[in-house]
Image (cartoon, helix red, strand yellow):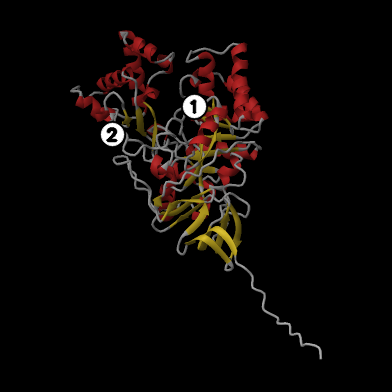
């Protein structure tokens, strides 16, 4: 008798797929501008590997995103982090504001040797990803210093060579700061020639224009002209109207951008959501006074006839603003005397025991310049213009900030709260734009503009730069009087798949990468 063989049919037991991080039950805004939907996201090896209803997935770490918005990490297209990377590599002010990638090298100021700069960052490791432009001002300084003259042909070719090498090393484009020394001394054709070099490597032309006040329309035309001549995309930095006499002129400036796009020029703008700017005290003085460095500035200002000419220049500009005193410039950082920080020039002048007159305040400004100058916050924009510019759809949000050193100086609050201010004040409270639109401006639009491949959208195969925040409570806490306050409301931030903010606290993770154009 043959043995009876019994085959047992057992049900197939499938093993759950495993992720490094699994985000469950989130209200997903993918960065495209589409409406939100509920879902899960699986992250593995720094990438998004699955999205949808992932009930069969397991993970080393699971985040319950119930009640939270899940969005791509924000991309800040206008920053100035050079010099502060080593002082604060965790970049807390950016991370707490949902920023996972920064573009530095703006306003014509950058490292010249981009290859060496990226190597330093790769070794140091920041908490944020970094892309950089190459700055025209520093290229010019490297070749002809701060001289108020045109480069000769040999010098021009050296400048072109520096830009070309920077682009080969991975810069995302060329930036100019045509209001700053020595960029202000350059003619348009000089910039066009350098822009053409960056264009050959598919770079962007990003410009702090020659003027953002009375001559703003001419400055916009120059930026558009450079883009057309170089056949390259244009990004106009911190688009605004400076000076009370220019309030309302967004009705002129925004349509200029619209028309240029209709004509086929890839031009976009960026903006910080505040009515105050921040830059150097030196911008109050005539350009010619600032040539050739600090020693030359002191020598010029030592001459009575020049002091009178500079005073007359500053008083004329003040009158144009329809102001009687220099109350609008506030000291952010003055190395020579930190007690000035947070005080207006009007207040500093009174502290010095001088008469409450604009002419006396001009003397105070010149004395501060003789002592090395100062970083300033300038109050001079209208909120209606801020809103009108914000409504323009091809406009990104940018902080124009450094990596903040907590407690140092009295800096502009934009360095702590730019994105949260948009989300709380202009989306939630004033409803200037929708949440979906705000997220698009912070994510996919900048990723597209600066060619940051595989970022800016929540999609399978893309880098896992992800933010989770409470749309009802997210808030910027930084103010002009008390700037050193982090944003609240971002519960989790992932950079390249690594949890960097957990339950609202930065855990010290430094998973940022350098992002090269090629």
Marks 1/2: CA–CA distance: 25 Å
Label 2 sits on residue: 342
Picture quadrant where residue 354 is located:
top left
Mark seen at residue 109:
1
Total tally of numbered discs in the picture: 2
Label pair 1/2, CB-CB below 8 angstroms: no
Residue 504 screen position, x and y as percent: 39, 53
Which mark, by number, is residue 202?
none
Nearer-the-camera pick, 494 or 444: 494
Query: Residue 322 versus residue 397: which sits nearer the camera?
Result: 397
Q: Position of residue 292 (x, y in %)?
A: 44, 13
Side (left or right) of 383 relative to 393: left
Pick the front one: 395 or 67: 67
Q: For the point 31% across and 33% down, which residue is it?
A: 409
Q: Secondary structure at mark 1?
A: loop
Q: Nearer the viewer, mark 1 or mark 2?
A: 1
User: Label 1 crowding class (10 Å Cα cut-off): few <14, some 14-19, many 20+?
Assistant: many
Which residue appears farthest toward the right when viewing the image? 1
Question: Can I make out residue 273 in this image?
Answer: no
Name the quadrant of the N terminus.
bottom right
């Amino acid at each position: 008798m043959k043995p009876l063989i019994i085959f047992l049919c057992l049900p197939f037991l499938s093993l759950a797929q495993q992720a490094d991080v699994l985000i469950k039950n989130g209200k997903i805004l993918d960065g495209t501008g589409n409406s939100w939907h509920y879902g899960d996201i699986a992250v593995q090896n720094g990438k998004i590997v699955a999205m949808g209803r992932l009930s069969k997935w397991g993970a080393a770490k699971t985040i319950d995103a119930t009640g939270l918005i899940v969005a791509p990490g924000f991309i800040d297209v206008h920053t100035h982090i050079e010099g502060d990377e080593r002082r604060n590599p965790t970049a807390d002010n950016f991370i707490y504001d949902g920023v996972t990638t920064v573009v530095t090298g703006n306003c014509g100021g950058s490292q010249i040797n981009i290859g060496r700069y990226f190597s330093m960052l790769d070794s140091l490791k920041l908490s944020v990803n970094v892309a950089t432009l190459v700055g025209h001002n520093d290229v010019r300084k490297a070749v002809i210093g701060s001289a108020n003259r045109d480069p000769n042909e040999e010098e021009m070719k050296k400048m072109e060579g520096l830009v070309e090498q920077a682009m080969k090393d991975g810069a995302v484009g060329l930036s100019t700061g045509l209001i700053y020394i020595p960029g202000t001394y350059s003619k348009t054709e000089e910039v066009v020639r350098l822009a053409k070099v960056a264009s050959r490597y598919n770079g962007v032309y990003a410009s702090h224009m020659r003027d953002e006040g009375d001559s703003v329309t001419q400055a916009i035309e120059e930026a558009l002209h450079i883009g057309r001549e170089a056949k390259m995309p244009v990004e106009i930095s911190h688009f605004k109207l400076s000076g009370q006499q220019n309030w309302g002129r967004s009705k002129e400036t925004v349509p200029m951008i619209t028309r240029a796009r209709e004509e086929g020029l890839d031009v976009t703008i960026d903006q910080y959501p505040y009515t105050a700017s921040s830059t150097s005290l030196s911008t109050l003085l005539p350009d010619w006074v600032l040539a050739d460095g600090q020693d030359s500035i002191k020598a010029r200002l030592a001459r009575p006839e020049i002091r009178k000419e500079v005073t007359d220049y500053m008083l004329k500009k003040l009158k144009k603003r329809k102001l009687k005193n220099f109350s609008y410039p506030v000291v952010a950082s003055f190395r020579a005397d930190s007690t000035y920080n947070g005080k207006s020039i009007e207040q500093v002048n009174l502290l010095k025991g001088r008469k409450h007159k604009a002419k006396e305040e001009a003397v105070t400004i010149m004395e501060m310049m003789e002592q090395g100058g100062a970083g300033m916050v300038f109050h001079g924009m209208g909120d209606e213009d801020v809103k009108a510019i914000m409504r323009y759809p091809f406009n990104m949000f940018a902080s124009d900030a450094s990596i903040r050193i907590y407690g140092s100086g009295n800096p502009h609050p934009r360095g702590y709260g730019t994105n949260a201010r948009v989300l709380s004040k202009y989306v939630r409270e004033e409803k200037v734009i929708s949440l979906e639109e705000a997220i698009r401006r912070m994510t996919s639009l900048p990723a597209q503009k600066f060619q940051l491949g595989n970022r800016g959208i929540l999609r399978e195969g893309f880098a896992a730069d992800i933010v989770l925040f409470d749309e009802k409570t997210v808030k910027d806490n930084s103010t002009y009087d008390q700037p050193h306050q982090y944003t609240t409301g971002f519960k989790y931030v992932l950079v390249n798949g690594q949890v960097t903010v957990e339950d609202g606290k930065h855990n010290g993770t430094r998973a940022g990468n350098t992002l090269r154009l090629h």
